[in-house]
Image (cartoon, rainbow, N blue to C red):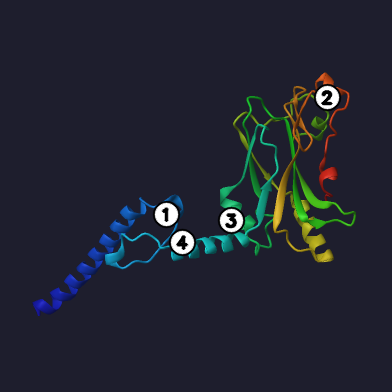
Amino acid sequence: MTRRILSPTLLIFVIASAFVVLATRYSKSEASYPAEEKRMKVVRRQGQLKLKPTAREKDSFKKNVQEEKKEEREVDDKIPKHLPLKVKLRSEKEKAFKDLKNENWTRDFELEVTNTSDKPIYCLELVLVYPEILSDSGFKIGVSLRYGRPDFIEFDTRPITTDVPIQPRETFTFHIPEQHQQAWREHKARRNWPDPKRVEINFVHLSFGDGTGFTSRGGTPFPFNRKQSANPPCREGPKQTADRF
């Protein structure tokens, strides 16, 4: 009776110990792999735990990654790199926004923009463009994303007491306004538009509220110097970039 009771107990203990050894060896051997291989999960027998992924396994892994990327909505950040802005999709919403099967992707768009300058930003305007979708006039469809009063589009506009800026190193999150979400759903149903597989984030205007800032898609600084003043760049608003709803 003692043997019959003890044997299953020992068997369970041995199996559990084997799993612990397996996990420990896999963890140690994984640390020596390149970054790409660390994300791979390869099933190995206990005597083959130290074997690195084979060329065939690597190729299969890369193919699967590429296929997964094809299933995601692409985000093309076209904001000029010299601007004092750091932008990224909010990590909690990124997967849902990029999911091509998600019909509520406009609701899940959340763009975090950080002011990396040493001055407060009183006005910031971007435009989210759907380059695959064209209006009747031939323009790409887009949605304006604006922080601050529209008056700051004029270079000489100064802050008033009700203006609240984005402070240095502070982050503001842009959403697609509800009315634009509704407009997209209506246009999509009426015109049989597909959901875009790619979106672009373009720059329009940034004002520090002191007469300085950046404007146009190229992020031209203002006020303009004398050489520029003879032929200043045109401020490219959303209408010049894309048609809005």
Earlier sequence position, callout 2 versus callout 4: 4
Q: CA distance from mark 1 to mark 2?
A: 52 Å
Q: Provide residue 99's location: percent of width, then percent of height.
A: 63, 60
Judged from this view, the residue extending furthest toward the top is 226
Residue occupied by mark 1 = 38
Query: Nearer the viewer's eye, disc 2 or disc 4?
Result: 4
Nearer to the camera, 38 or 12? 38
Say which amino acid is labelled 1.
Lys
Amino acid type for the residue under numbered disc 4 = Lys
The residue singled out by tag 3 in the image is: 95
User: Circle 2 sits on which residue?
Assistant: 228
Q: Nearer the viewer, mark 1 or mark 3?
A: 1
Residue 117: horizontal and vertical position, in percent? 64, 28
Q: Residues within 10 Å of mark 1 (few under 14, many from 20)?
A: few
Instruction: Place residue 24 in its image quadrant.
Output: bottom left
How crowded pointer 3 is (Cα within 10 Å; few <14, some 14-19, many 20+) is rated as some
For mark 4, give the secondary structure. Answer: helix
Quickly name the residue at label 4: 58
